[in-house]
Amino acid sequence: MRCPFCGNIDTQVKDSRPAEDHVSIRRRRFCPACGGRFTTYERVQLRDLVVIKSNGRREDFDRDKLERSIRISMQKRPVEPERIDQMISGIVRRLESMGETDIPSKTIGEIVMEALARIDTVAYVRFASVYKNFQAAGDFDKFVSELRPHVAPEE
C-alpha cells in the first residue's frame, strides 16, 4: 500500500481488525520512510461491476461514488451512520449478486431509491430529485403527492 504522505510503496500493517460494519477489515498502517500512520479498509469484491450510463457510456462501478450520493441525501437526517453503512453494503451485495457484470445506472438508481424509501422519506425525496432530474417545484409536488396514500373523501 502506497503511503499517502510520502508515496513510499513499502508500508507495514501494524494492526488489523474487523470494521464496525463487519463487512470490511480495518488496517492501521505505518510508513518506515516518513513515520506516517494511516488507516485502510479492505472489502470483499465478488466481481468487477461496470455501470452502463443512460447515454451508453460505460464506467467502472465506484462504491465511494454511490456512498457519497447516499450520504448527501442523508445529510442532517436522524439516521445512524452504521445504518447507512449497512444499507450501502446491502445495495452493493445486491448488485454483485445479480449475476451480471454490466448494470444499467437506472437499475442502481431504482435499488438506491427503494432502500432510501424504507429508511427515510426525506432522503428518498432528496435522492429522487437528483436521480429524476427535477426542474421545478411542481416536480417535487407531483412526486410527494404520489407518496401520500390516497384517501377517499368522506361523505
Image (cartoon, rainbow, N blue to C red):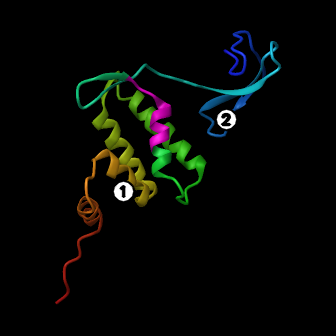
Q: Is residue 148 left or right of residue 21?
A: left
Residue 14 can be seen, yes or no: yes
Q: Which quadrant holds the N terminus?
A: top right
Q: Earlier in the sequence, mark 2 or mark 1?
A: 2
* Mark 2 or 1: the one toward you: 1
Q: Which residue is mark 1?
A: 125
Q: Secondary structure at mark 1?
A: helix
In this rendering, position of residue 137 left or right of residue 23: left
User: Was residue 15 drawn as part of the magenta stretch in this picture?
Assistant: no
Q: Is 67 included in the stretch rendered in magenta?
A: yes
Pointer 2 with pointer 1, Cβ within 8 A: no
Assign a secondary structure to mark 2: loop
In percent of width and height, residue 43 lies at 58, 26
| 129 to 95, vertically: above or below | below
Please tell me whether the stretch drawn in magenta is mainly helix, strand or loop.
Answer: helix
**Distance (Cα) linking label 2 and label 1:** 30 Å
Please say if 58 is above or below 125.
above
Residue 4: name its quadrant.
top right
Q: Position of residue 146 (x, y in %)?
A: 25, 63
Q: Which mark is residue 143?
A: none
Q: Which residue is mark 2?
A: 19
Picture coordinates of residue 15, whole percent (x, y): 78, 25
Q: Residue at x 48, y 48 (%)?
A: 72
The boundaries of the magenta stretch are 60-69
Q: Position of residue 125 (x, y in %)?
A: 36, 56
Instruction: Locate residue 108: give its quadrant.
Output: top left
* Residue occupying the point 34% across, 24% down: 99
